[in-house]
Amino acid sequence: MTDPDTAERPDADAAAQHRLAVERITEFTDDDLGALCEATNAAIIEGGGFGWLNPQGRVSLETYFRGVLLVPERQLLVARLDGVIVGAAQLVRPPRNNEAQAFAATLQHAFVAPYARGFGLARLLTSRVEDAARSLGYHVLNLDVRETQEAAIALYESMGYIRWGVHPAYARANGRTVRGIYYYKVLQPGGRIA
Ligand SMILES: CC(C)(COP(=O)(O)OP(=O)(O)OC[C@H]1O[C@@H](n2cnc3c(N)ncnc32)[C@H](O)[C@@H]1OP(=O)(O)O)[C@@H](O)C(=O)NCCC(=O)NCCS
């Protein structure tokens, strides 16, 4: 896996030469689905393709992403670099029966393909997921991340996410148990939970 602290990141001039965009996607063109699957496998191979540890076949990934679009509680947001999908994140709403936590949504499965990193896409993606959650009336956004995902931890902490807990047996990767870090962010002005 690339060490996030030593991996070379594009400078601001390089980033300015690209078009960055984030949007919610509700149906796929063949090109979009192909690019999303390619970006997912690239992230898996690099070591951070959300839950997956091994690259997946195209049929399996296409089935997965088509399935995501069918889940009423999920919104799929995609990041585009010069028009091509290179990353994604999911906004997950609580199930209807969970009235006690109806104020909180979850950000899951965020990633940007290694070939599109360092341009600010993850920051834009996270911010758009927050906007979507806010516009749906949620007061809190929760997320969790493997402690080995140092770039993600730096991103979320720089965006005001509050670390509230550590799960000692959060994931198993490459034969070892990895801790998970849990975060929340209050989305409404003033940082208070209504
Ligand atoms: C985390 C990840 C999404 C960042 O994507 P990205 O598009 O390169 O991130 P951005 O360019 O928007 O950078 C935003 C911030 O993230 C942090 N960051 C990004 N890359 C970093 C790196 N290599 N080292 C340290 N911090 C980093 C910085 O705080 C950065 O802000 P800055 O540019 O002002 O310094 C990407 O590295 C990734 O997909 N990692 C694997 C999957 C993962 O960890 N997902 C999150 C949890 S499921």
Image (spheres, grey):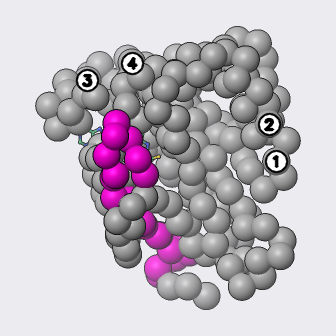
Classify the position of ligand 1 by quadrant: top left, top right, bottom left or bottom right: top left
Q: CA distance from mark 1 to mark 4?
A: 29 Å
Identify whether 93 is placed above or below 46: below
Look at the numbered disc 1 and give the secondary structure of its residue.
Answer: loop
| Highlighted range, magenta | 171-191
Please state if 118 lies on the left or on the right of 133 as rendered: left
Please state if 64 lies on the left or on the right of 72 as rendered: left
Residue 99 percent coordinates (x, y): 78, 82
The residue at 25%/28% (across/down) is 2
Asked whether the residues under the numbered discs 2 and 3 touch, taking CB atoms below 8 Å apart as contact, a structural biologist would say: no
Say which of 149 and 80 sits in front.
Answer: 149
Comparing labels 4 and 3, the label whose residue is closer to the camera: 4
Which residue carries the number 4 mark?
115
Mark 1 residue type: Val
Identify whether 10 is placed above or below 188: above
> Sequence-wise, which precedes: disc 3 or disc 1?
3
Q: Residues within 10 Å of mark 2 (few under 14, many from 20)?
A: few
Q: CA distance from mark 2 to mark 3?
A: 34 Å
Which residue carries the number 1 mark?
71
Look at the numbered disc 2 and give the secondary structure of its residue.
Answer: helix
Asked whether the residues under the numbered discs 1 and 2 touch, taking CB atoms below 8 Å apart as contact, a structural biologist would say: yes
Mark 2 residue type: Gly
The chief SS type of the magenta part is: strand
